[in-house]
Image (spheres, grey):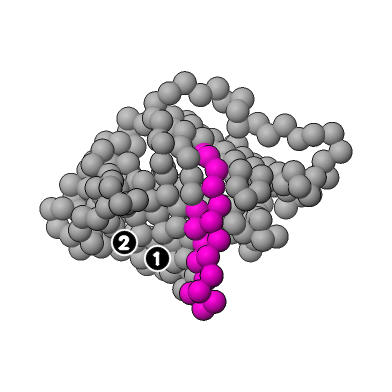
Amino acid sequence: MRSFTKFSLTAFALMLVFNVFGAIEANAQGGGALNEVLKRMEAHRSSLTSLKTSVKMVKYNPQLDESETTQGSATYLPAKGRDALIRVDWTKPRKETLSVVNKKYVLYVPDLKQAITGNASEAKGNGKANNLFSFVDMSKDELKSKYDIKYHGEEKVAGSTPTWHLELTPKSASPFASADLWVDGNGMPVQIKITEKNKDTTTIQLSGIQKNITINAKVFKVDLPKGTKIIEG
């Protein structure tokens, strides 16, 4: 289930990047600067019709001082009146695919010749899927009430991209302790770091971003080869 945990954290982080922040009001520290960042994020979210991006994820265990880097790509298609479509394809160091469509997920691991599938609403109470689906059905009002936001100023991502750094802390019980977000001048989140309660971190960085391009919804369907073992999650 290690692969599922990795995917759940990744999908959770990406969905935060794509969906959550446009719904959050500036009700925390940062004053005018924070208001401006959130204003740009809301404008960006409203104008975004599609997204393709390269993804690098670094998981770090501070107790062991060990890190693991995974690389791949993500495709995102917002949909008015229904849940967004998202697909993550890892290519290094191994191939794995996660797709979420209409609150149903497919996690395909070709090396194991197996796929884990399930329904979002049914998976909510299941610990292994909780990070992925716990927020899917939240309304905007719920999102606004769940995070305290702090503005940490201007910082550069990947050594050259100017960004604003925000920190979000859940107001109530959550699968993570905090989430840090780095937002570029267009209001596009380009990096997010999730800190778990045991201090482990997952940092996801986006690059080669393509926005508002034509994407066929068929790409979100995972074609499982004959003989794939399907496990209901």
Residue nearest the viewer, comparing 150 with 138:
150
At a point 57% along the width and 25% down the height, the residue shown is 217
Q: Position of residue 164 (x, y in %)?
A: 24, 52
Decide if residue 100 is in sight here.
no
The local secondary structure at tag 2 comes to strand
Q: Which residues are magenta?
A: 57-74
Question: In the rendered image, which residue does mark 1 sit on?
Answer: 178
The kind of residue tagged 2 is Glu
Residue extending farthest left: 32
Considering the image in quadrants, where does the N terminus appear? Answer: bottom right
Labelled pair 2, 1 in contact (Cβ < 8 Å): yes
Name the magenta segment's main secondary structure: strand
Q: Is residue 125 left or right of residue 149?
A: right
Residue 82 vs 17, above or below: the answer is: above
Q: Was residue 50 drawn as part of the magenta stretch in this picture?
A: no
Q: Earlier in the sequence, mark 2 or mark 1?
A: 2
Numbered badge on residue 167: 2
Q: Is residue 2 left or right of residue 215?
A: right
The kind of residue tagged 1 is Ser
Q: Position of residue 101 (x, y in %)?
A: 60, 36
- The 10 Å Cα crowd at callout 1, few under 14, some 14 to 19, many 20 or more, is some
Residue nearest the viewer, comparing 5 with 91:
91
* Mark 2 and mark 1: Cα distance apart in space: 7 Å
Residue extending farthest bottom: 63
